[in-house]
């Protein structure tokens, strides 16, 4: 047996060649992951705080009679006032597939033309396929004037009395 | 003009034009376009009813879509202020703008039809087994790619149709558990369809997807050749192999010319639709998705989005695992496997034609599962339950065909496939013609 032939050692599980190949492969994989991560971050949506105008000032409470619904197209919501005087800022985005609902005063309901969902004044589902009540936006009251924060929609399964805001 | 012919031949072939078989074969092998073909083709594979030219038509439409698409890019602007005016200008002032847009639009729609028919044809001939199974899956991927192409292109005119179809389409995505909202936000570049969405869809439609298409198609063609070409039934006698020039090439040229002429006439007669400028506050009534999604949209009216999505995913998965599910290659190349298989296919189709409209009517007019099972969550009463009922019905059809017709596994699958495809066509037809304002059922005639 030639003296200079490399002999695999008995207790060595991985040869030097295998180790280097494995290392190169691992480095390649890390590089690939980094490239993927870069691409993902580059392409990720950029969220701007206060989209659709952030906080929308909707005016004094007494300008909305109980049982009325007023649309704020720029804020993408409806200000609904329940019969007992409580306020709710209802998103116009249908919870089914995101079409814009419109208010039908004659029937007293929000209707979505895309798949026929209906909601009542406080946003509860009257007719599926919508799976849950319309989203709401938080309302704050200062000096009797209402402000609606449209930055973050609040999801809910159905209406609960504590969602109403009283002046 | 013979010198001109000679020059053109010099460009097309490296040597003189082919006078007899041997040089005809060499001409195919040496020509950059023709070498996609084998030099000789088995005579049975050349029969028109073997392929109906569907794969070829799809490839031709892809090329046509790239050419017209590149032209449209020179006159289009992916900005929400300028996209709609740009398309309006094409329709009104730019010479041949309306025609080019029409050809692009209708070619895209026709491609949707031909790739589905191509898949049906390959299924019927059993061309998804053995060595061909990889290419079946690749082809299925290409089908999804064509759908993605159509979906991304749909937004670009920025009209009402575009805006609301994409809003609904990405709304559907948000129901995918865990990652749905993230994927939807990523695609749209934000929470709603806006400038970022238009830019993203444009980049996908004109850059990323075409690259995937070109590589995918090349691979698809290469595999067709390597896997043995068109599936033909076992032959009792020695198969005659005919040279590609002229037997295949002339047939292809004929089909291509008929397709192009038909498409051109159609695009001249029916311009591509363009509705009013997109208005994020007021969806049109009824707001419908693109026609090739109306089958799924019809499902959405009857069950929870998650269930409809699951059903579509199960269908696609079923097609993807078909090569493993049906490995019985004894009847390779025989359309519908056997007379029994043909019978199973007919029964499946007939059942779908009767059952699907009936179920739509019953669910629309009488059955209100969520109200019947009021305390249970709609996810169960309107989601899990209809999903299980549908899957149970499909299993019942399979079992019925096995027992009633004494069909083999492979033949019963023909019936199942035919039922699902015809049901999808019926649902799509209901969505296109029988849904009026508020998506209520209407009689169109």
Image (tube, rainbow, N blue to C red):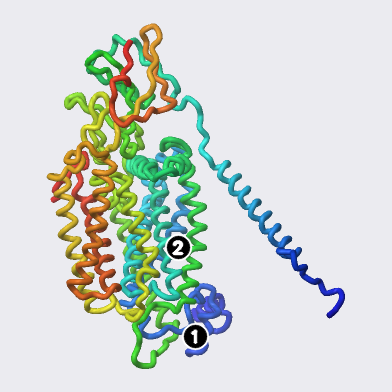
Residue A88, which numbered label?
none
Q: Furthest-bottom residue in view?
A: B237
Q: Secondary structure at mark 1?
A: helix
B395 or B201, nearer to the observer: B395
Percent x, y of residue B361: 15, 49
Residue under the image location 35 percent in, 44 percent down: B172
* Residue projecting furthest to the front: A11
Instruction: Quadrant for residue A10, please give it.
Output: bottom right
Q: Position of residue A123 (x, y in %)?
A: 27, 27
Task: Looking at the picture, tell me which residue is in the foreground, B436 or A13.
Answer: A13
Q: Nearer the viewer, residue A83 or B221?
A: A83
Q: Which chain is home to disc 2?
A: B
The answer to whether A52 appears left or right of A2 in the picture is left
For mark 2, does the 10 Å Cα neighbourhood hold few (<14), some (14 to 19), or many (20 or more) residues?
Answer: few
**Residue for point 86% across, 74% down:** A4
Residue at numbered disc 2: B63
x then y, percent, for residue B96: 40, 52
Is B98 in front, or is B26?
A: B26
| Circle 2 SS class | helix
Classify mark 1: residues with Cα within 10 Å, few (<14), some (14-19) or many (20+): some
Residue B268 visible in the displayed image: yes
* Residue drawn at 26 percent across, 13 percent down: A85
> Picture quarter containing residue B411?
bottom left
Where residue B24 is drawn, which disc sits there? 1
Q: Position of residue B183 (x, y in %)?
A: 45, 44
Q: Between marks 1 and 2, how big is the CA–CA gap?
A: 26 Å
Image height check: is B228 above or below A144? Answer: below
């Amino acid at each position: 047996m030639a003296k200079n032939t490399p002999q695999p050692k008995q207790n060595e599980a991985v040869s030097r060649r295998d180790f280097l190949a494995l290392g190169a492969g691992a480095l390649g994989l890390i590089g690939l992951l980094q490239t993927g991560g870069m691409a993902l971050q580059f392409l990720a949506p950029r969220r701007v705080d206060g989209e659709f105008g952030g906080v929308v000032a909707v005016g004094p409470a007494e300008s909305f009679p109980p049982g009325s619904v007023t649309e704020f197209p720029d804020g993408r919501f409806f200000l609904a006032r329940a019969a007992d005087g409580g306020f709710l800022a209802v998103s116009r985005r249908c919870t089914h597939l995101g079409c814009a609902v419109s208010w039908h005063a004659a029937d007293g309901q929000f209707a979505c033309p895309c798949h026929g969902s209906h909601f009542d004044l406080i946003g509860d589902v009257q007719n599926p396929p919508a799976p849950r009540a319309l989203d709401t936006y938080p309302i704050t009251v200062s000096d009797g004037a209402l402000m609606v924060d449209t930055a973050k929609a609040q999801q809910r399964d159905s209406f609960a009395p504590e969602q109403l805001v009283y002046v | 003009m013979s010198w001109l012919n000679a020059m053109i031949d010099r460009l097309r072939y490296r040597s003189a034009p082919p006078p007899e078989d041997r040089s005809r074969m060499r001409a195919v092998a040496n020509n950059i376009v023709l070498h996609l073909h084998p030099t000789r083709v088995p005579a049975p594979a050349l029969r028109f009813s073997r392929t109906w030219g569907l794969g070829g038509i799809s490839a031709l439409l892809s090329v046509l879509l790239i050419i017209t698409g590149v032209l449209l890019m020179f006159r289009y602007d992916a900005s929400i202020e300028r996209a709609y005016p740009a398309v309006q200008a094409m329709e009104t002032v730019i010479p041949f703008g309306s025609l080019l847009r029409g050809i692009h639009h209708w070619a895209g729609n026709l491609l949707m039809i031909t790739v589905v028919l191509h898949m049906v044809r390959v299924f019927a001939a059993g061309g998804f087994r053995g060595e061909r199974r990889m290419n079946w899956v690749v082809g299925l991927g290409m089908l999804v790619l064509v759908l993605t192409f159509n979906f991304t292109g749909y937004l670009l005119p920025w009209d009402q149709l575009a805006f609301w179809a994409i809003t609904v389409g990405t709304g559907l995505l948000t129901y995918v558990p865990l990652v749905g909202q993230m994927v939807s936000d990523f695609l749209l570049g934000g929470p709603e369809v806006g400038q970022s969405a238009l830019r993203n869809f444009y980049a996908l439609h004109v850059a990323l997807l075409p690259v995937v298409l070109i590589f995918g198609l090349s691979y698809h063609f290469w595999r067709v050749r390597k896997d043995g070409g068109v599936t033909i039934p076992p032959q009792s006698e020695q198969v005659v192999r005919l040279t590609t020039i002229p037997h295949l090439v002339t047939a292809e040229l004929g089909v291509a010319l008929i397709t192009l002429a038909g498409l051109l006439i159609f695009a001249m007669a029916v311009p591509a639709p363009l509705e009013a400028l997109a208005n994020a506050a007021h969806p049109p009534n009824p707001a419908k998705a693109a026609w090739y999604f109306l089958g799924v949209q019809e499902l959405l009216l009857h069950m929870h989005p998650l269930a409809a999505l699951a059903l579509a995913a199960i269908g696609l998965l079923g097609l993807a695992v078909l090569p493993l599910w049906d490995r019985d290659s004894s009847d390779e190349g025989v359309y519908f496997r056997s007379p029994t298989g043909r019978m199973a296919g007919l029964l499946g189709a007939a059942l779908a034609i009767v059952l699907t409209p009936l179920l739509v009517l019953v669910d629309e007019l009488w059955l209100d599962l969520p109200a019947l099972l009021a305390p249970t969550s709609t996810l169960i009463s309107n989601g899990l339950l209809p999903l299980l009922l549908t899957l149970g019905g499909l299993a019942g059809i399979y079992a019925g065909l096995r027992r009633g017709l004494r069909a083999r596994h492979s033949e019963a699958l023909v019936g199942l496939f035919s039922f699902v495809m015809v049901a999808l066509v019926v649902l799509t037809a209901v969505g296109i013609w029988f849904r009026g304002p508020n998506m209520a059922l209407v009689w169109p005639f």
